[in-house]
Amino acid sequence: MKKVIFGLLALGLTTQISAQIIKTEELSEVIVMAMNYKYLNDVKTGEVASIPVEMLERKVAAFDVKNSDFYQDDYDLYNITFFIPDGKILAAYDQEGKLIRTAEKFKNVNLPAAVKASILERFPEWTITKDIYLVNYQESKGATKRYKLKLENGDKALRVKLDEMGNFL
């Protein structure tokens, strides 16, 4: 009885295996282009930046204007705003979906080591209470990064501006 059951089981499995016919189709060629890689290279810092900042910058670089609901062939420029609780990015795209320029503003980001060192050297007794990170990107010029900091020492307050290298502006 066992031999009959195992025989039927083996016969049932082998007939299903040979019944499968695999069709081969040749797929069309796909071209992958990174449109906004220059933007990501320019805004990237050597330091570990804030995770929400990097995520929003990647969303801006990956945004596809042509597949959006409001795309029309008539317009040459599209201004799109991206928001998160810690900041926002206003991005301008051309008709092909290429990123032309951005204006970015973020609060409470991780400051680069050069900025921290400059503050500590020039204002040793002061603490940073607020910081704003500003980025202006233009396709032809690249990215300019600035930091606006509010420093406090007791009841005194001071506002300073620095670039990404820690130079006071």
Image (cartoon, grey):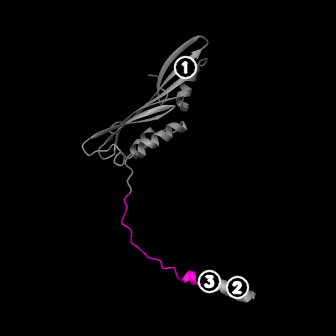
Residue at numbered disc 2: 6
In the rendered structure, which segment of residues is drawn in magenta?
Answer: 15-31
User: Where 19 sits versus 153, above or below?
Assistant: below
Q: Residue furthest right?
A: 1
Q: Calculate the distance from the C-alpha at mark 3 to the C-alpha at mark 1.
A: 83 Å
Mark 2, residues whose alpha carbon is within 10 Å: few (<14), some, or many (≥20)? few
* Front position among marks 3 and 1: 3
Instruction: Please state if 114 lies on the left or on the right of 39 as rendered.
Output: right
Q: Where residue 169 appears, x then y in whole percent? A: 44, 22
Tag 3 secondary structure: helix
Looking at the image, residue 36 sits to the left or right of residue 75; the answer is: right
Q: Residue 163 versus residue 156: which sits nearer the camera? A: 156
Amino acid identity at mark 3: Gly
Disc ID at residue 73:
none
Q: Which residue is pictured at 42% across the width and 34% down the height?
A: 89
Residue linked to disc 3: 12
**Dot 1 surroundings within 10 Å: few (below 14), some, or many (20 or more)?**
few
Give, as a three-letter code, the residue at label 1: Arg
Which three-letter amino acid code belongs to the residue tagged 2? Phe
- List x then y, in percent, for residue 84: 49, 34
Q: Circle 1 sits on which residue?
A: 122
Q: Is residue 98 left or right of residue 51?
A: left
Is residue 11 covered in magenta?
Answer: no
Secondary structure, mark 1, is helix
Find residue 113 and report its image quarter.
top right
Q: Is residue 33 above or below residue 19?
A: above
Give 85 or 152, whichever is nearer the viewer: 85
In the rendered structure, are the residues bearing label 1 and label 2 in contact, judged by CB atoms less than 8 Å apart? no
Q: Label the magenta part by its dominant secondary structure.
A: loop
Q: Nearer the viewer, residue 165 or 148?
A: 148
Say if 11 sits above or below 145 in the image. below
